[in-house]
Image (cartoon, rainbow, N blue to C red):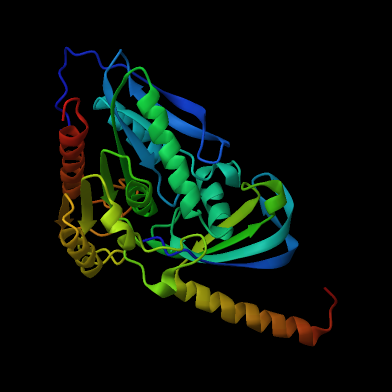
Amino acid sequence: MCTNISETVPAAGAAKGGAGWFPVTAANVGFDHAVGSRFDHALLLDFVDPARGPSARIAVELDLETGRALVAALQSVIEAAERSGAPV
Amino acid sequence: MWNSLRTDAPAGLVAGVTAYQAGDGDLVHAYVARPEGPGPFPGVVLAHHMPGWDELYREFARRFADHGYTAICPDLYCRTGHGEPDDVAAAARAAGGLVDDTVVADLVAARDLLRALPTANGKVGVFGTCSGGRHALLAASKAGGFDAVADLWGGGVVASPEDLVPQRPVSVLDYTADLDAPLLGLFGDEDQFPTPELVDRHEEELKKHGKEYEFHRYADAGHGFFYYHRSAYRADSAMDGWAKVFDFFGRHLSTGS
């Protein structure tokens, strides 16, 4: 099924793909048809720079369990980063 | 019918990417496949699925051409940009997805292009799977003017008010009265979108309005059971489904039908 579930957040960073590093200006999070994994549907995480066209994309497909674990790990690391006082 | 070709018959076809004037006047890419020869050939407009204007749909177009149709598959994501199909599809999804009215206009323009070809027999059907099934049915209902429509597991045909968004503001079900072409529907009983209950609801509406339709449901199949590159593939159901498609279009798009 086509869920059309998708959210976009502005992003500041960079990602590395086959053509090397490029700036990441947005992160798209969706849940829809999987393409590269064997799931019917997957959490879709895309790190993109739309100004560079559709190919400026680092794509990841995950199951929901992995997504939850990733959210928890992100939260944990963000809190540790803030406690460390190290600048971004 | 699959593999019913004659070994002594000419089997040439011509296929490739062209650009055509789409519904809003934009030049949009389309993959066109047609049999060699003067015709007359019926036409089929292919509304590609959400995963994109991809290799699978190019194969679909060539399969139709092998069976005697001129097939055109517009790149409905053409305005989003270019790259590998999954990247373009991802960009389109992030932008909110396709706009119904634009898709309908693009499919209608493709239909008119096919009808104007010197090799045309004047009959044009529209075919789509997944979101393309919904778009095919929407075009045949809202715009009309097609001679047959094949909706293969189109999700969102029966939409609740909370499902409606600016890009997809209507439940196609509400246009059932306007459908002016016979409809073929293929569905898997294990599909969650549309569920068998949603297919039942669609069928009720078609009966209520006295529409010509035939639905075929496959007990062992879910969503996308033609897709041989996905685990959803169900060989027996897919081959029977293709036979249903060619039988249906053969009856409704042949010259003189």
* Residue A58 x/y as whole percent: 61, 55
Count up the numbered dots: 0
Q: Is residue B55 above or below residue A1?
A: above
* Residue A78 x/y as whole percent: 70, 80
Q: Is residue B16 above or below residue A80?
A: above
Is B1 on the left-hand or right-hand side of B143? left
Outermost residue toward the bottom in this view: A83
* Residue B65 x/y as whole percent: 30, 27
Is B9 on the left-hand or right-hand side of A48? left
* Residue B179 x/y as whole percent: 28, 51
Residue found at x 21% / y 70%: B197
The N terminus of chain B is located in which quarter?
Answer: top left
Residue B215 showing in the rendered view? yes
Residue found at x 42% / y 70%: B163
Is B75 on the left-hand or right-hand side of B208? right
Q: Is residue B156 above or below residue A36?
A: below
Return the residue nearer the eye: B216 or A48: B216
The C terminus of chain B is located in which quarter?
Answer: top left
Residue B54 showing in the rendered view? no
Residue found at x 84% / y 79%: A86
Residue found at x 45% / y 73%: A64
Return the residue nearer the eye: B126 or B24: B24
Q: Determine which quarter of the picture holds residue A76.
A: bottom right
